């Protein structure tokens, strides 16, 4: 109904600023954890748990639903994005140094 507007409102009222299906979240943030990068063969739930343990995110800041992960504070999402960006930079430096 209404393109998911009611669900969106319900999730926002519960205090969660970000929600993403498990597989999409895992694809985006897999680089953060050595266990999930470059390939994760387990369930998305276990992969997400590895990622969250790697960044030491408080369990109160995120929650898993039936098919999506929910993150409360934008700061927690910024932590994930910053960590992801640092990993990409590190890999880029390794590639550049090997190329030279």
Image (cartoon, grey):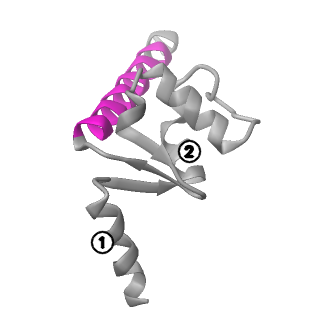
Left or right placement of residue 58 versus residue 25 in this view: left
Does the stretch in magenta take in 76?
yes
Q: Secondary structure at mark 1?
A: helix
- Residue visible at 39% across and 27% down in the picture: 57
- Exactly how many numbered labels are in the figure? 2
**Disc assigned to residue 97:** none
Query: Observer-nearest residue: 90 or 34?
Result: 34
In magenta segment, residue 56: no
- Dominant secondary-structure state across the stretch colored magenta: helix
Mark 2, residues whose alpha carbon is within 10 Å: few (<14), some, or many (≥20)? Answer: some
Q: Nearer the viewer, residue 82 or 5?
A: 5
What's the magenta region?
75-95
Q: Quadrant of the N terminus?
A: bottom left
Determine whether 46 is above or below 92 in the image: below
* Residue indicated by mark 2: 27
Q: Name the spot of residue 39 as percent of width and height, x first.
A: 69, 33
User: To which quarter of the image does residue 26 belong?
Assistant: top right
Residue under pointer 1: 9
The residue positioned farthest toward the bottom in the image shown: 1
Query: Whole-Å distance between the Cαs marked 2 and 1?
Result: 26 Å
Image location of residue 55, percent across then percent down: 42, 22
Location of residue 96 in the rendering, given as x and y in whole percent from the top left corner: 44, 17
Is 7 placed above or below 40 here?
A: below
- 28 with respect to 80 (left or right): right
Q: Residues within 10 Å of mark 1 (few under 14, many from 20)?
A: few
* Location of residue 54 with respect to 14 vertically, above or below: above
Q: Nearer the viewer, residue 94 or 52?
A: 52
Please tell me which residue is depicted at 30% across the width and 30% down the height of the picture: 79
Q: Residue at x 41, y 16 (%)?
A: 93
Label 2 or label 1, whichever comes before in sequence order: 1
**Callout 2: helix, strand or loop?**
helix
């Amino acid at each position: 109904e209404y393109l998911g507007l009611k669900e969106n409102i319900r999730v926002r009222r519960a205090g969660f600023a970000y929600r993403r299906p498990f597989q999409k979240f895992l694809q985006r943030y897999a680089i953060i954890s050595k266990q999930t990068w470059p390939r994760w063969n387990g369930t998305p739930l276990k992969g997400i748990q590895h990622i969250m343990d790697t960044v030491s995110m408080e369990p109160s800041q995120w929650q898993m639903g039936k098919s999506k992960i929910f993150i409360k504070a934008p700061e927690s999402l910024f932590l994930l994005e910053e960590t992801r960006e640092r990993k990409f930079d590190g890999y880029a430096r390794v590639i550049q140094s090997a190329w030279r």
